[in-house]
Image: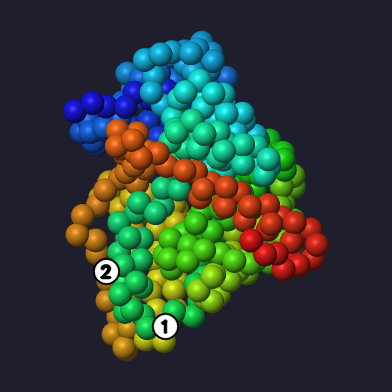
Amino acid sequence: MKKIRYGMIGFGGIGENRIAKEGFALDRGRFGKHPVADLVVAWDPNPAREEAAKALGVGWSTTGEAILDDPTIDAVVIASNNRTHAQWGKAALEKGKHVLLEKPAGVNRKEVKELYELAKAKGLSLGVDHMMTKNEYNILARDLIEKGELGDVSSIVLHMEFDYGLTPAEAASWRCNDPLELGGPIGDVGSHCFYMAEFLLGSKISELSCVYTPKTATFNVEAGAYIKFKLESGVEGVARVAFDQRRGSLDGTLKNLGYEVYGTKGFIEGKGVMFQLSGHDDEPVALSLTAHIGGEVGELVPAQITNIYASQVAEHAQSILDKRPLSGEGAVRNLEQILLSHESAQEGGSLKKM
């Protein structure tokens, strides 16, 4: 079977540990070969990252442009800092490469809309890494909700609160130091809350309002946010996100990353399911999905576990093989939700329509 040959622009921690090792299954101690995708070459502005790439058997390019000019490369993963996502994405599309972007796809409406239109005009696949929709626990939760097991759903609460940026090194990182990167809690993890609410409930967010939480941390981005939203279905939701909330142990921190969905017959709660984990036995904490229905409490366990990053890469690669390109529409909507949240907070929590 033909495989799609990928290059990667940006080979930091996420690029190496999640996208390369898991997404392309290059951690051979854990995974077999990826069935439809190969990561051939990578580049990062930090030349010290070359050693990490080569240790995984990935070639190294001296420039990002050289990857885009390589006729043997079919597609490019963009895993650089947020402010360069759209720039590299546009350059790749102009060279005829399919693109899989880390989220957010860009930092302003104009550049992300241009990506969407360019991919459409060229018939190229434009994907964004909304990998939590590939988590088997989240798929199980979605299916349970869709079948009506909770009755009429009234609300959803999603929470991604932890500590990041409280050390000098973290505070100096692009994620915490430059608000224009959209790397603070709203752009970094609020973005996950938005697409996951839509995924779980099968409806799009129609309006939202947001306030920033009190700030005592010294980094430059917002410390946290409380976001209220409504879906087209009428269901209401809340997203709580923060970089200044300690949760004690690693277990407490990771299991806090989850959601509750409430209906007339009961509710479900997912723990650890809003993170970079898939549910493999060798991961640092066990994921869980608990149903409270009709006075009974039960643990819901998926029939199988698939890696969320490998599934994300497979979806993009398969869309190329099938000549059914991904549109990137979700990337446009997700950025709009991030920007509206900031605009609402800067106006004291004003209501914003999508």
Residue 292 image-quadrant placement: bottom left
Looking at the rendered structure, the kind of residue marked 2 is Leu
Q: In this view, does 164 lie above or below 292?
A: above
Residue 162: numbered disc: none
Label 1, residues with CA under 10 Å away: few <14, some 14-19, many ≥20? some
Q: Which residue is drawn at 50% across and 56% down?
A: 195
Tell me, yes or no, if residue 8 can be seen here: no
Looking at the rendered structure, the kind of residue marked 1 is Asp
Q: In this view, does 43 lie above or below 29?
A: above
Of residues 163 and 311, the one nearer the viewer is: 311
Q: Which residue is drawn at 51% across and 54% down?
A: 192
Of residues 274 and 107, the one nearer the viewer is: 107
List x then y, in percent, for residue 38. 31, 26
What is the spatial separation of the Cα atoms under label 2 and label 1, in whole angstroms? 20 Å
Q: Mark 1 points at which residue?
A: 152
Q: In this view, does 195 lie to the left or right of 55?
A: right
Of residues 316 and 83, the one nearer the viewer is: 316
Q: Which residue is drawn at 79% across and 58% down?
A: 346
